[in-house]
Image (spheres, rainbow, N blue to C red):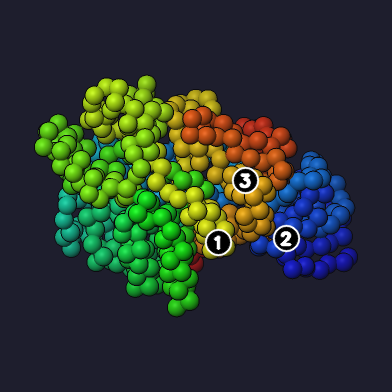
Amino acid sequence: MLARTGKSGLAWTGKTMRYDIVIRGGTVFDGGGSPGERADVAIREGRIAAVAPALSGDASRAIDAEGLAVAPGFIDIKTHSDFTLPINPRAESKVRQGVTTEIVGHCGFSVAPCLPGKVELLKGYLAPSAPWLPFRELDFPEYLDTFPATSVNAGMLVGHNTLRLMVMGMEERAPTNGELGRMSGLLEEALSAGALGMSSGLFTAPGSYAKPEEMVALGRVLKRHDALYFTHLRDESNGVLEALEEAIDLGETCGIHVQVVHFKCSGTDNWGKVSKALAMLEAARQRGVAVDCDAYPYTAGSNPLKNILPQWVQAGGVGTMLERLKLHETRARIRADIAAHGLNNWGRIESWDAVRISITPNLPQFAGRTIAQLAAERGKDPVIEDKGATRVLVTSISEDDVRELIRSPKALVGSDGNCVATTGVTSQGMPHPRFYGTFPRVLGRYAHEEKLVPLELAIHKMTGATAQALKLADRGYLREGMRADVTVFDPADFMDRATYENPHQYPSGARTTVIVNGAVVVDAARHTGALPGKVLRRTAEGVVQ
């Protein structure tokens, strides 16, 4: 037997074996960032059994990958699919992009813990993001233990906004020592059960009411468990650099890993700041701070409509906000604030045509229309009618900034999108096209067509590099012994087709095959119905399995 390891980490072996699946003749990108090498990949019992240029041995299934790229399954580090996976377990829009693992519970929003007597409070709070999800009383251990079978792996975060909501409601103040202790206890319980870490959404109430002292106290809980911290910055627009510094300071103070999610410099006044932000992140790494960021390849973001209003409007919860919005003086003050400072967390936009209705359970006929169109046609303020349950798309990001983040080897790839489908309950509305197109958009448009980033680096940014940031023990690489999460695709025919006007479209790629834990989930671009995904848990040693 001849065995050697090349620079890519591929292991060559001539040993004859019996395999479950052999992927033959493809160009293998092992996830480490090195150029692809022609090789076969063998899978047995849910793991990579061998990678070699010409494997001998029998297999129950052979996949012809001639002319195709063979990569680790893509890891979507930033998603909200906890709002849709229980009702769309096939994860159609994600797994057809080659995604095999999703990290959920971001931006401070998680569906657990949901304490006794707080179901309606949490349901109302998350309604714009999870309009179809049933809520129930649920602690975090039960949440992990009872999560349904799905087509993709899922790692869960506990949301700081949810913790605050459970303990303090929408109170605009610092927590008492007892309240902070209760939040810390709920966080401890989630981490002990296997939550990967905590997410924060400091841009919106009630998370925005948290001072650094509160976040440091919770950060020290994360440190004790060697867990991770994911943050939607306090401000992604006019104060984005100061907010980034706050996140870095928390990581440095507590000695924890910080993931700055869906990083952007939003609003026309802030275009061009990405270069300085990336330099700040690199400087922090150089002095020993563990910090990463991720981004999606689009110039529009998405948020509940209520969240783009000034924070004082949102104080007290949705019901209080809706009553406040009935007042003429409230609406006049909102217009003055937006004229002076731009949208909350989004900055200045070119016009209200930059804000498009995405999903609105209460007013479904308005999906796809812009705020400017609705206001002109109806002579009303649409925000008053939406009952706080509408999501919007906001075009506020520079394409040059998007391209710089894609080009950067240090910026990971995350969709910030739910798994949805072209049929069923999740096919409603006009979601952001990133739900369907993030990963093929990076690989097909920016890597293959425009050569903005080498294909091997683009793959690394969504596999091996992401696995390192998440401390995944055995995913993110195509190497012997790793979990068999594999994506096979044609770099010349793997393009995003979802648009803002017609988002419910799967990517192209007639030969795309996706394997999760050794089971074929997408077979030549067709979903097999398999649900082999696992709930990933952080161990006592801090690694995720």
Question: Element type at marker 1?
Answer: loop
Q: Which mark is residue 15?
A: none
Q: Classify mark 3: residues with Cα within 10 Å, few (<14), some (14-19) or many (20+).
A: some
Quarter in which the N terminus is drawn? bottom right
What's the CA distance linking mark 1 and mark 3?
Answer: 16 Å
Residue drawn at the location 20% of the way across and 50% of the way down: 168
Question: Element type at marker 3?
Answer: helix
Q: Find disc 1 in the rendering and name its residue.
A: 408
Q: Nearer the viewer, residue 275 or 73?
A: 275
Q: Find disc 2 in the rendering and name its residue.
A: 35
Find residue 181 and report its horizontal and vertical position in percent.
Answer: 23, 61
Q: Is residue 98 above or below residue 469?
A: above
Question: Element type at marker 2?
Answer: loop
Q: Are marks 2 and 1 in contact (CB under 8 Å)?
A: no
Along the polypeptide, which appears first: circle 2 or circle 3? 2
Question: Type of residue at label 1?
Answer: Ser
Find residue 480 and report its horizontal and vertical position in percent.
Answer: 72, 60
Determine which quarter of the picture holds residue 92. top right
